[in-house]
Amino acid sequence: MTRREDREPLSEEDLAEIAALPKVELHLHHEGAAPPAFIRGLAQEKSVNLSGVFRADGSYAYRDFVHFLNVYEAATQVLQTPRDYGRLTTALLEDCAANGVIYCETFLSPDFCGGGDLGAWREYLHAIREAAEAAERDMGVVLRGVVTCVRHFGPDRAKPAARCAAETAGNWIVGFGMGGDENRGELRDFMYAFDMAREAGLKLTTHAGEWRGPSEVRAAVEELRVARIGHGVRAIEDLALVDLLAETGVVLEVCPGSNVTLGVYPDLAAHPIARLRERGVKVTVSTDDPPFFHTNMRREYVSLAQTFGWDADTLRAVTRTAADAAFCNTDTRDRILKQLDTK
Ligand code: HPA
Ligand code: ZN
């Protein structure tokens, strides 16, 4: 490998090519993708008091990860109806399309969309899918949904979330997973929900190895038997586990900008994404909650190029890994792969 200081800096032209690459994003929280102005607008319409959610400059205000989760849930209060979620879907897909994203999966929680009630969830899903169909037609960006339970809401609320996922599993709801506070509870407590989703034919992912260490990543692979892991980056602290990830082909949904902003790593140069990739782990790149973390997919790709010397071909390969790991059906995947070949 070329040492960082020995590498030629990438030219403006190289960086422009990298920014313009077609992209695939697998780890994006639906509410976390809401532009602050969109949330402020809804708060005004509905007279919801969101004091403490925004800084004076209009960005989201939080101190650390747990506070971020609180602010996230406070902002989500203004999303009260299926129509609100339809509008949010349009807004977030506009941002995806502007960043060259041609396929993305977002995390959708029945807890926020109807409080875990199946009938209400179906209505939210209908509105989201309608907006997604329009965005695909108008902007060429394809969306699929991954239902998530929320770890700090506990296993009892994960069950109705999994039931909503199982009952609506198909060509659009393609996966099940878990977000929330990784420091709360144990992964095995959520086995019932994950098994229900697996039996319904859904593909599985969970957040692990962002805040807790390698043992959490191992539990995700060996106990929940997920195909992908949200973050998973702290696997780097156990090289036997890194080898296991490489051998089994478990895919990491890596969100470098999120990790740096939240302080998991001091800066991108200290981030393990390049080391994981060099050791054979399938890594993909996502934004997590882009306006919260002051990022977007273009910025992620350009920063990786600048920090690790990843050229356009390397980033194309990473995008292809993401398309291969997408939870959509084969027809959709083939369509995306074909687009990646021609763009
Ligand atoms: N991490 C974990 N849980 C979440 C996040 C996140 O970035 N956003 C919303 N729920
Ligand atoms: Zn996340």
Image (tube, helix red, strand yellow):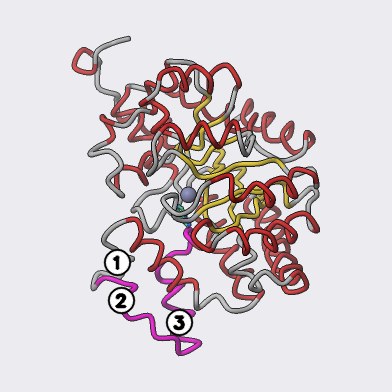
Three-letter amino acid code of the residue under disc 2: Gly
The reply to whether the C-beta atoms of the residues labelled 2 and 1 are less than 8 Å apart is yes
Closest to the observer: 85 or 236?
236
* Residue 43 within the segment the image draws in magenta: yes
Rounded to the nearest angstrom, the CA distance separating label 2 from label 1 is: 7 Å
Point out the stretch of residues depicted in magenta: 32-55
Residue at 39% x, 28% y is 273
- Mark 1, Cα crowd under 10 Å, few <14 / some 14-19 / many 20+, is some
Front label number (1 vs 3): 1
Sequence-first disc among 2 and 1: 2
Three-letter amino acid code of the residue under disc 3: Ala
Q: Which mark is residue 3?
A: none
210 w.r.t. 40: above or below: above
Closest to the observer: 136 or 285?
285
Q: Which mark is residue 52?
A: 2
Three-letter amino acid code of the residue under disc 1: Ala
Q: Which mark is residue 61?
A: 1
